[in-house]
Image (cartoon, rainbow, N blue to C red):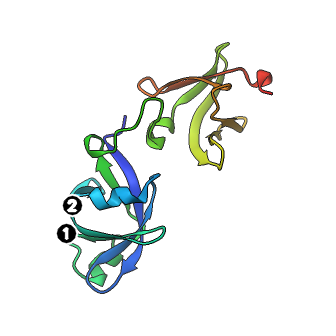
């Protein structure tokens, strides 16, 4: 499993004093208020303050003190260490732990590795892109077992989906 969990992406500068505008890659934008320590390119940085907008976070990060400094971080990802990440309830997983898992059905048929997780209104969908492309609805009737430790997800055989 990865050591860092991606929680956002710096999409722009904000103001003249090095603040950055962050697109959240987390379910709850309010989590940004609790961030004290983050990583950008695996370099630890302290969060000085955070302000939330409707769908973005504005962060002041230690060591980024001008608009010229901030522009260098545009498009960079903000990560937290796994031990500082939010504790998930049982049966919930970080997307970063799902991506790359091999999907097999109960009969042992290998469908490939998960390329991405698509979030929809009703449920997530696992996207396998290699070989024959496949979209797998993440429903209890289809996904039998998720084992992120061994990077293996077991599903019902595709032909049995209703």
Q: Please provide percent x and percent y for residue 151.
A: 47, 27
Query: Closer to the camera, 54 or 148?
Result: 54
State the residue position of label 2. Answer: 45
- Which mark is on residue 33? none
Q: Please provide percent x and percent y for residue 109.
A: 67, 18
Secondary structure beneath label 1: loop
Left/right placement of residue 130 relative to residue 27 reads: right
Q: Please provide percent x and percent y for residue 46.
A: 19, 62
Q: Please provide percent x and percent y for residue 18.
A: 27, 79
Location of residue 16 by image quarter: bottom left
Secondary structure beneath label 2: strand
**Residue at x-position 36% and y-position 46%:** 5
Query: Closer to the camera, 12 or 112?
Result: 12
- Which mark is on residue 62? 1
**Residue at x-position 47% and y-position 35%:** 92
Location of residue 9 by image quarter: bottom left
Label 2, residues with CA under 10 Å away: few <14, some 14-19, many ≥20: some
Label 1, residues with CA under 10 Å away: few <14, some 14-19, many ≥20: some
Q: On the rendered image, what quadrant is the C terminus found in? A: top right
Dot 1 or dot 2: first in sequence order is 2
Callout 1–callout 2 Cβ contact below 8 Å: yes
């Amino acid at each position: 499993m990865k050591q860092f969990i991606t929680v956002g992406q710096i999409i722009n500068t904000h103001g003249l004093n090095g603040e950055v505008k962050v697109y959240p890659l987390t379910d709850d934008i309010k989590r940004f208020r609790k961030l004290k320590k983050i990583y950008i390119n695996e370099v630890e940085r302290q969060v000085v303050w955070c302000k939330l907008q409707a769908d973005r976070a504005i962060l002041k990060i230690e060591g980024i003190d001008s608009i010229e400094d901030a522009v260098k971080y545009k498009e960079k990802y903000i990560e937290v260490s796994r031990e500082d990440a939010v504790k998930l309830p049982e049966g919930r997983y970080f997307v970063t732990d799902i991506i790359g898992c091999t999907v097999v059905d109960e009969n042992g048929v290998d469908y490939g590795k998960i390329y991405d997780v698509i979030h929809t209104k009703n449920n997530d969908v696992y996207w396998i892109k290699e070989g024959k492309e496949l979209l797998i609805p993440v429903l209890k009737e289809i996904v039998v077992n998720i084992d992120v430790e061994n990077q293996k997800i077991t599903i019902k055989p595709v032909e049995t989906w209703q």
